[in-house]
Amino acid sequence: MVKEVKKKHCGMASIVGRPNVGKSTLLNKVLGEKVAIVSKVPQTTRNQIRGVYTDERGQIIFVDTPGVHKGRDQLDRFMNQSAYGITSEADVIIHLVDANDRVGLEEEELVERLHSLKVPIILGLNKVDMKGKTIPEYITLWERVTGKPIQENPHMTILPLSGKDGTNVSKLIDIVFDLLPEGDALYPEDTICDIPQKMVIADTIREKLYGLLQQELPHSIAVIIDVVEPRKGKLLYIQAVIMVERDSQKSIVIGKNGALLKKTGTLARVELEQLLETKVFLELFVKSHKDWRDSPNLLQEMGYQFM
Ligand SMILES: Nc1nc2c(ncn2[C@@H]2O[C@H](COP(=O)(O)OP(=O)(O)OP(=O)(O)O)[C@@H](O)[C@H]2O)c(=O)[nH]1
Ligand SMILES: [Mg+2]
């Protein structure tokens, strides 16, 4: 008897939505590993992050994107462009919303754009571990834009989700596989993520700093990695600059007697040692540069490449 060989599927699923809806948390849950930084602060993700999921059915390249938001400087422009740019290449779009938060102004424009791409959409109603009281608002919005009830729309699927506790995450993977074209894997089977090492290091430091600063200053902070250098005794030397917008913000980042900066360094070093599987010596500096969010050179140094 000839055994039937099932064709594999491969393609890109882009996770798009407003800041803070849980896109990066969902990506980490799907991959079972932390690849994207997460914080309570909106606009945490500043670049695209590709996470690769492979099983016997094939390969899904999930793309986490910066939250789509209003904003006028060069970094805002980059973040929105990067979210929309990647979305136009996707085979499937996961429109992720916070099912406890009301529909926002950005959402209307986003939904219209996503609808015009003519790509299958999964409306991910996220954070259903909480009450999910605004679910109807998102359904109504999509129905208004597409002009038909979602149940009658062959291009749409609704899925309640929780990236935090994992509700329906494996169902999401099933649905995406069903929607992907046939094709061979694009990445080797053991690939999980393709972010450049410097970006991973910078983001890890930024995440720790966001956690310690709570809601203070996130918009004003960037991290630039100046040196990554293997040294004797399997030690990786990393020198990084934390950039703020004003001199007065430097003392907040440094903290009383340097305490906050020291704590940031320790937390980041511990995580980086785990991630990079080597001992790390991390040296942090704090500088201010008034218009870094609008400086193409500095943004490029931080790894944000305009398309
Ligand atoms: N209750 C609950 N909280 C969640 C869930 N997913 C994420 N969060 C929390 O929501 C906050 C934002 O999560 P992120 O994953 O950073 O959100 P994001 O959409 O990537 O945000 P940006 O990168 O800023 O666009 C964090 O405090 C998460 O812990 C969820 O399923 N349930
Ligand atoms: Mg994010």
Image (cartoon, helix red, strand yellow):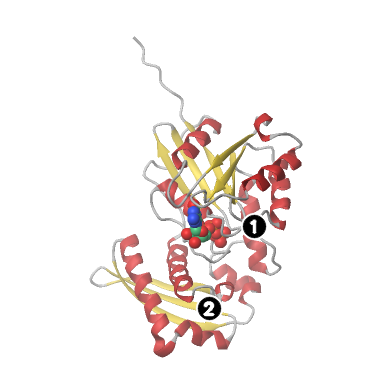
In primary-sequence order, the first of circles 1 and 2 is: 1
The image position of residue 91, as x and y in percent, is: 59, 38
Tell me what residue is drawn at x 63 percent, y 73 percent.
Answer: 293
Name the one closer to the observer, 111 or 245: 111
The image position of residue 48, as x and y in percent, is: 55, 55
Q: Residues within 10 Å of mark 2 (few under 14, many from 20)?
A: many
Q: How crowded is mark 1: few (under 14 residues within 10 Å), some or many (20 or more)?
A: many
Name the one closer to the observer, 119 or 10: 119
Side (left or right) of 109 relative to 267? right
Kind of element beneath mark 2: strand
Name the one closer to the observer, 204 or 276: 204
Q: Would you name the residue on which mark 2 appears?
A: 243
Q: Distance between the residues labelled 1 and 2?
A: 23 Å
On residue 134, the disc is none
Name the one closer to the observer, 238 or 212: 212
Q: Would you name the residue on which mark 1 appears?
A: 68
